[in-house]
Amino acid sequence: MKKPLIIIFLILFFDQLIKIYIKTHFFLGQEVNLLGGWFIIHFTENNGMAYGIEFGGDFGKLFLSVFRIVAVGAIGWYLFSLSKQKEDNLYVICIALIFAGALGNIIDSAFYGALFSDSNYEVARFLPDDGGYAPLLHGKVVDMFYFPIIKGHFPAWFPFWATEDFVFFRPVFNLADASISSGVGLIICFQKRFFINKTDPIANENTPDVNIPNKES
């Protein structure tokens, strides 16, 4: 369990360090171009899930925050149970990545609204005298990584989006989002190793049976 705990701690530490720095040094929409415009630090916030997906209204926001807490609790319990079993180390690391990312974004949505002032047109203040910009569980998730690697226009013959602008990769995300995506991506890539070989009898045909002869007295 030591290695997953180290991974969780490092992701949470750097995720929150980056978010607090951005929150206290940038105003909403401010950006810094890096790597010739292929990598941009762009401060934005969202009310919803990873990569800016949202649920509408105050009820939707509250539901999402509570759902996140329940989900991360379930993932944490699952991770703890895996540590008690002889599970594949890589699979345990994948779950740790997902857990750390989910917990990192929960911290934003649960506490940032009460801890920081609003970031519109000014840099946010920590623990402002007049209170934060939102009550507990109604905060916004801080995003900052933007990789518009390819920009262009869809051709006129292209269905639905003809002549419209396109950007790859459009979503703005944070380290917690990247951690979740990495964990899920690794599980997909190594699903045969993690799941199929354990349940498929054909995959285990080459495992020799060891018969221990009975000793007759």
Image (cartoon, helix red, strand yellow):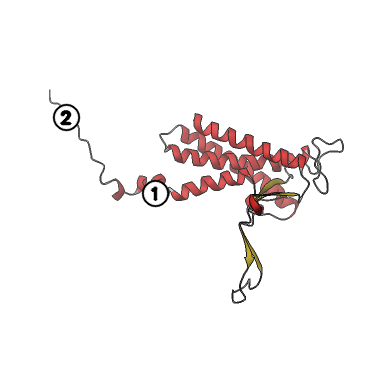
Q: Position of residue 193 (x, y in %)?
A: 39, 46
Residue 165 placement, left or right of 190 = right
Kindly identify the amino acid type of the residue bearing the numbered disc 1: Lys
Q: Position of residue 128 (x, y in %)?
A: 84, 36
Q: Nearer the viewer, residue 9 or 71?
A: 9
Residue name at image x 50 percent, y 29 percent: 2
Q: Which residue is mark 1?
A: 192
Q: Residue furthest front?
A: 36
Give the vertical position of 163 relative to 37 (above or below): below
Q: Nearer the viewer, residue 131 or 210?
A: 131
Q: Residue furthest bottom?
A: 157
Q: Which residue is mark 2?
A: 214
Q: Position of residue 97 (x, y in %)?
A: 54, 41
Under circle 2, the secondary element is loop
| The quadrant where residue 89 appears | top left
Few, some or many C-alpha atoms within 10 Å of disc 2 (few <14, some 14-19, many ≥20)? few
Kindly identify the amino acid type of the residue bearing the numbered disc 2: Asn
Residue name at image x 70 percent, y 46 percent: 141
Q: Position of residue 159 (x, y in %)?
A: 59, 74
State the mark number for residue 79.
none
Counting residues from the start of the chain, the first of labels 2 and 1 encountered is: 1
